[in-house]
Image (tube, rainbow, N blue to C red):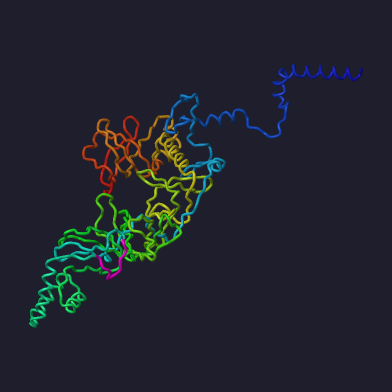
Amino acid sequence: MKIFLATVIAILLFGAGVSLAPRLQPWLADLNVTVFASASPTLPQSEGKSAVAERKPVKYRHPMNPTIFSDTPAQDDMGMDYIPVYADGDGSDNAGPGFSIAPEVVNNLGVRTTLVERGDLARRIETVGYIDYDERALSHVHLRASGWVENLKVRTLGERVRKGDLLMQVYAPDLTNAQEEYLQSLRGGISLLKVSARDRLLALGVSENQIQQLEKEGRVRQLTAVYARQDGIVSALNIREGMYVMPQTELMTLADPSTVWIKVEVFEQQAGWLTVGQKAEVRLPHAPSELWEGSVEYIYPDVDPKTRTIRARLRFPNPGERLKFNMFADVVIHAAPRANVLHIPREALISTGVEQRVIMAIGEGRFEARPVKTGIESGDRMEILSGLAEGEQVVTSAQFLLDSESSVRASIQRLTAPPRSDKSAGSGLEHASAEAGKNRDVFQPIWAEGVINTVERDSHTLNVTHEPIPELHWPAMSMDFPTARSVELDQLPLDRKLRFRISEGGDGRYQIDAIEPAETQP
């Protein structure tokens, strides 16, 4: 019974406390009494409101397209809210160049970096060639007198012959008459006629052995034998048994397969790498584990008008005749290396078609897009001519996402107020009055360099790819500029570096009011 009464009293007291708490709160506040004490102190409510009020969005960004902004809160076609964009980015300390990314985002993106290195960069020319005959080891078979082919010994292409083998016999009236004259000169004993008749036989292609046999036998042979002058295979056969042939007829061609030529084509950009005598390696698709070594023997002096390539000829020994004529081969030519140059992984480079740039990791979660000029490409490495220094860190993965973020940050900077002059920055009162709109500063014209891509004469607009403009905190980019009416658009050169002056137009937009050659100083 006592326990039951104690429970009822406790419930009544709790209800009374709840009902009286709102009435007692002002009185307790006047007495500086805290009803519920927290474990950690909190800021006063007025200070929290002022801190929140200080940080207002300058724009609202489309959730799917980072190039679309709105001045007021909005939703896209799918009902997704626009993302607020603040002047200070994510609210962290954004002092210094580049832009900052939260560490957890960097980790989720899988950002990897590597150092800019300096050293020798090998130059390898990788191309495809086709195997051809060594033209210095070719011999064509012709007759020096008209006649008929008899007793043809070689009847198929690719047939192998050796030096001195009988190829065919021919009946040629001129050869028969020359033999008869020589025999008559031998019987007459007149040395001058003998020499003349012998020289005629030699001129008609009769060999010394055949002349000696004619002297020994003392009779004319109606059929004259034609012998092979070298070892080789028959690469061309243009006759058949019984054909009538003339001196201009090519009877057959003999090719020596012990050495071959490999003809390759090299891009114009690599023309300066080629020199005679460079080492070359060849691999065949059907035997990738085998390697043939040769050298560059000749570089042709012209450029192929259709493919715009430089042709070169390589010479290779062909033991076992593994290199077959007209076969394709993978060729690597080892050019002299580039010594002591800066180079980065090729995957770190971002090519836009207008410029090339990399994303730099500048420490403490900050990144920066930087334009570079590249040189040769060697395997998976790329030479850097300008824009980087040895030991700097470049991003090799997720760089395209970071580059997009850099472009978005640059767009946000363009949406903010233009830079103030030094005069207004020196006085707090003047700056305050400028903020209030009482003493608006005049934008100082800025000179920049860039290339004009297109000219829109109707709207008096230029599309310009400009270099970084530090005064406006703009990175290198392509954008449209309205022009002042005083700028003449008819004679502007395209795709050529120019200097142009940026000023503030009457509508508050940046405009170009002067253009001059890049070499001229303002």
Q: Is residue 165 magenta?
A: yes
Indicate whether 10 appears above or below 504: above
Q: Is residue 368 magenta?
A: no
Residue 7 coordinates in the image, percent (x, y): 85, 19
Q: Magenta segment, which residues?
A: 159-167
Residue 440 coordinates in the image, percent (x, y): 38, 32
Q: Quadrant of the N terminus?
A: top right
Q: Residue at x 52, y 45 (%)?
A: 111
Is 358 on the left or on the right of 463, as rendered? right
Residue 478 coordinates in the image, percent (x, y): 35, 39
Q: Quadrant of residue 269?
A: bottom left
Residue 17 coordinates in the image, percent (x, y): 77, 19
Indicate whether 327 appears above or below 20: below
- In terms of depth relative to the viewer, which is nearer, 114 or 504? 114
- Count the labels in the image: 0
- In terms of depth relative to the viewer, which is nearer, 388 or 128? 128
Is 499 on the left or on the right of 103, as rendered? left
Indicate whether 69 appears above or below 156: above
Q: Residue at x 11, y 79 (%)?
A: 195
Q: Quadrant of residue 12?
A: top right
Is 198 on the left or on the right of 226, as rendered? left
- In terms of depth relative to the viewer, which is nearer, 226 or 359? 226
- In terms of depth relative to the viewer, which is nearer, 158 or 356? 158
**What is the residue that sits farthest to the right in this orientation?**
1
Indicate whether 484 appears above or below 333: above
